[in-house]
Amino acid sequence: MKICVLGAGNMGVSFSKSFLKYELIKASDLELIVRSDNKAEKLQSEFSKSTVSTFEKVDNIEADLIIIAVKPQDFQYVVEHLPFKIKENQMLLSIMAGVKIEKIQKAFNHKLVVRAMPNSPTLLGMGITGYTAAEGISFSQLINIERLLNSTGRSVYLEDEEQLDAVTALSGSGPAYFYYIIDAMIKAGIEMGIEENLSKLFVKQTMLGAYHLINNSDRSLEDLIKDVASKGGTTEAALKSFNESELKSTIEKGILAAEKRSKELNA
């Protein structure tokens, strides 16, 4: 399989590296297309056996799969600066937030479109991607797409494209929510007199341990919370403060705001 990545930012590069790492394609069968010559030069040194070009210098793409990995705000630039028609048998895989399959089909006058929403842990091969497909995509084509997506972590097929806005808000944006909470915990540690690096160590190891407890336990989150929050204790005091501040409701509202923005990006 030959793959072309339109817009090789963080996500496009992480996908490309995963495909090569797991030998799903040969380096010579990978093409990266970016906007600037400076970016192209940097990527060429990183992907020395692959083809790296700018949009202005491309007159044809021979890839079996074309991955649209630009920001949704830059999608119109791609449409206007792709000076050739996509071939009938080429597949498009979009990893843009918010932009629906129908809009992509109309923009390129092309039917074979798969839409996916990965998240940043794909950089470590630990991401999760929700994806869906237009009508007319065969089962064998979907299996090939899933094989590629799974090289970056895990993937989940969704029958209903509308759910991808929720996936965008939940897991696509999700890592930032955890970073936000972790940052608040580290700063609280510093305020209590713990040196910054030591505060980071305590918080990061606590986060890692909590993840493994969740992942290796059949118990509910409520039960796991109760295990830590003994009556009249320190954890109960913190949880009481969180509840009084309606922290859980605030987080839910934030995620719903992210979903709303994802829907707006299709406009």
Image (cartoon, helix red, strand yellow):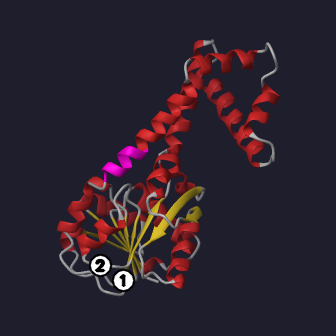
Rendered residue at 52%/78% (across/down): 142
**Residue type indicated by callout 1:** Gln
At numbered mark 1, what does the secondary structure look like: helix, strand or loop?
Answer: loop
Rendered residue at 53%/43% (across/down): 175
Residue that mark 2 sits on: 110
Q: In this view, does 193 lie above or below 94?
A: above
- From the top left corner, tell me how far across and down residue 75 is, in percent: 26, 60
Circle 1 crowding by C-alpha within 10 Å: few under 14, some 14–19, many from 20: some
The answer to whether residue 233 is magenta is no
- Residue 222: quarter of image: top right
229 with respect to 70 (left or right): right
Quarter of the view holding residue 143 = bottom right
Q: Report if residue 33 is visible in the image.
A: no
The main secondary structure of the magenta stretch is helix
Q: Which residue is drawn at 33% across and 79% down?
A: 111
Q: 93 left or right of 105?
A: right
The residue where tag 1 is placed is 90
- Labels 2 & 1 near each other (Cβ < 8 A): yes
Give the camera-side residue of 52 and 62.
Answer: 62
Range covered by the magenta-colored residues: 259-265
Asked if the stretch drawn in magenta spans residue 263, the answer is: yes
